[in-house]
Image: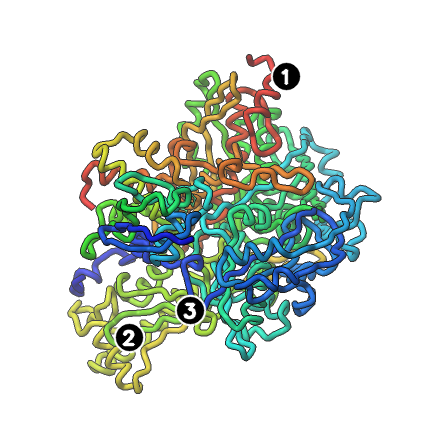
Amino acid sequence: MKRLINLVVNGESHEVAVSPEQTLLEVLREELGLTGTKKGCNQGECGACTVLVDGKPVSSCLVLAVSVNGKSVSTIEGLSQDGRLHPLQEAFVKYGAIQCGFCTPGMLLAAKYLLENRPKPSEQEIKEAINGNICRCTGYVKIVEAISAVAQGAAL
Amino acid sequence: MRLRDCKEVLEMSEFNIIGKRVPQKDAVEKSTGAAQYVTDLKLPGMLYGKILRSPYPHASILCIDTTRAKRLPGVKSVITFSDTPQIKFGPLVDDWYILAKDKVRFIGEEVAAVAAVDEDTAREAIELIRVEYEELPAVFTPGEAIQPGAPIINPEYPNNVVSHFKVERGDVEQAFREADLVIGDEFYANQVYQAYMESMACIAQSDGRGHLTLWLPSQVPSKTRMSYAKALGIQPRDIRVIRPHVGGGFGAKMEYDADLICALLATNTGRPVKIVNTRMEDFEAGNPRVPMSFDLRLAFKKDGTLLAKDLKALAGNGGRTVYGPAIMSTACYRIDSLYRIPNLRADGRLVYTNTVPTACFRGFGNAQATFALESLLDMAAHELGIEPAELRIKNSFNNGDTSPHGWFISTSGLADTIEQATQAAGWNDKKRNKTTRRGIGLACTNHVSGNRGFYRPFDGSSAILRVGESGQAVLIQGEAEIGQGQNTVYAMLAAEAAGLRYEDVTVAQVDTLIGPFGLGSFASRGTVLGGQAVIAAGKDAKRKLLAEASSMFNIPVEKLDIREGVVCRLPEQTKMATVAEVASHYMFRQGGCPLTGEGVYVPDTVVPDPVTKIGNISPVYCFATHIAEVEVDTETGQVKVLNYFASHDVGKILNPVGLEGQVEGGVVQGLGWALMEDMVTVNGKVQNPTFLDYRIPGVRDIGKIHVSFVETNDPKGPYGAKGIGEPALNPVTAAVANAIYDAVGVRIKSLPITPEKILAALEHTCML
Ligand code: FES
Ligand code: FES
């Protein structure tokens, strides 16, 4: 049986009919067409599907859509504002933190949460914040550099 | 962006864009989530496919009953072997059918498939298919599979040996007799999984008249058409491949059976069909690395001169052949172009086993062999009392050398990379002032940039650069960006060669209906072969732009130049026009046809002779030296990589950001292999098919990585450049093994180097 839920995604309210076992990841990708959130494993082990629910990072492949009824969800599609990239996006681009790009949306949201809660994180804290996000391409060096640059307010 | 004036652009250095830190062309769309991968695409009316895979490693199929699956509402097609073209095919050996004929040879082999209105229905239908199997005796390791009386997997190969490679140069026996030191040991490079973040995926659509369109995250979009056409009993022209963004490949994303299943389901239903592997399917039925064991002996003179190498290799093919034969032969002899060794012998066998088919993974066999050779060299250095870096410099190939297999090494930066890496690492100091449980280890590598033997009809590349009326340019080529930054380098090369601004060049996604036949991403060939073609296309476009400008202004061509989108008059350095003005003049004079530069590059490489194996397979050769600095916890056996130094002969630095990214990524992949990754397989079943149980490096698993480059300006490379993808990974495992030995005196000869192996080895030493 499908149930009608309300999701506020990137500030926009959506009514969606979902089945009880549908995950937030599926609803975002399949029902709302927000394919920026990636499915890397569907088992909560790679972080590619990271989104923010009420400001906190979650693996959307592990979250049932019905459980986020009424909550606010931020996905990668909402990170840039009025066509302007978020400083984290700019830094990821500039520092070469993006290769295949499949881990990027999840990484960016994990980093956004970090900087909103700890504007001046240490390198260790940056690593902890993205430890659940696997990247197979970059070796993480430039991802950490990019996040540090934003934290330190480097001119991009 | 403003156009610069002529004085400025002409007086810039030799290059306007080459050598600059340029972000990836498509990084912005990847950062916003706008970049579309095959897994993101949805076509109207699209169905979802699922594959029923064998639960047995070796079994006869007695019967398949699909009636219940077919009756399930929402199911549009159910197929088994009898619904397929029943043609044998395969990239190297014809031992594939699209769906299993009368037996299965590995857990995960494709037995039947379903297309349904959604994934849940497809999954449910798969569960309703009944297959009766009769289990057959199975064999799981190459060592067992070559024993007399072992179960036979493919009756056409009665001893399970898929391929046998032999090569011999000089007089190996005599060299071993006359040597001052003979050293030998056994090494094992295990099976690991590429773990690209986007699992294998395909969308297929048929137009109902026999033409197929496939959306594939493919490393070899043009080449797949050839093997797929054969499998489907159609012509290559009936297959169009479109390659959207690709979420990593590392060698795995070449021919893949699910693509063909998808094609058949789409043909049967007349609707687009999408198949995406679950992560578990991808682990169990992907294309992991060819596992290899080596028996390696080396002969030296007292002074460290290498006299001979004798290698025996035994490699696991899995239940059907992907690229194993080429990978095994590569392991046998590619490394012979690293050091001057006059007497060489290799004897390699690739063997069927009832396990997942194995294939390409960054390094292509050379990575496996490098682990063995570079470990044994370190052991030899100790025996000889020669410094390990010295020993390597002493034997390294130099500019202009030809290896015993006929490989012409126009430039070798090997010795320079040893210098650079040891300097960066403070090697001598750290060797002299050893700290307990800390160690430092060095390993070198060589690699190709292109492999003339891989695809017999040709090697080379071509590109088309179309300059439109606003000066915007589109580069059309058939090579395959899979996330490594290739398109960025191509746009840089095109802009440099044509005199355009980098930001005016767009690189088109690969579409085989439109672009040239590109061989794709393998053998670290993209930068060199594709790059040369792009430069040629850029030059051709520039020549046409100059000719047009010459007639527009009535100035001889020699008195004009184009840089960064402006046409300048020489020697006055005055601006005559923009590229946009010249290109639109051309276009409107030509009935709307845009100015188009065409570029072709055919390397002067040689397909190795099938008997002698002699032939120069690559236009340029890459070299590198890696140094790992580790700390070993002798209580737990845990290894921490504190510092890692990688120095690469890249010929010429085209884009430092891209190069560093390739090396950092390759090093971390290599560290995963060295220390943690292993596909644990018991009775043909992968025991750890999830990221929780198959751990790959996370951000906290790595120390500091220091990357540096040597420029040898190879005359055959694009502006002097060489490839980078695979050499970035090749030497990592040996560098780590050598560092561990330096730290605690134990020599681990089988990968991965787990804490258990270290502890077990430590028990036998008096270090504790
Ligand atoms: S897709 Fe959710 S953690 Fe991997
Ligand atoms: S950029 Fe490819 S997985 Fe991170």
Please indicate, yes or no, whether residue B326 appears anywhere in the rendered image: yes
Q: Are marks 1 and 2 in contact (CB under 8 Å)?
A: no
Front residue of B176/A100: it is: A100
Position of B668 relative to B724 (above/below) = above
Residue at which label 1 appears: B764
Q: Are marks 3 and 2 in contact (CB under 8 Å)?
A: no
Does mark 1's beta carbon lie closer than 8 Å to ligand 2? Answer: no
Position of B764 relative to B513 (above/below) = above
- The tag earlier along the polypeptide, 1 or 2, is 2
Subunit under mark 1: B
What's the residue type where badge 1 is placed? His
Quick one: SS at disc 3? loop
Q: Identify the mark at residue B44; answer none if there is no mark.
A: 3
In percent of width and height, residue B240 lies at: 50, 71
Front residue of B636/B442: it is: B636
Left or right of B90: which side holds B275? left
Query: Residue placed at 41% from the left, 52% from the top?
Result: A19
Please indicate, yes or no, whether residue B619 appears anywhere in the rendered image: no
Q: What crowding class fits label 1: few (fewer than 14 Cα within 10 Å), some (14-19), or many (20 or more)?
A: few
Residue at which label 2 appears: B468
Subunit under mark 3: B
Query: Residue placed at 72% from the left, 57% from the top?
Result: B611
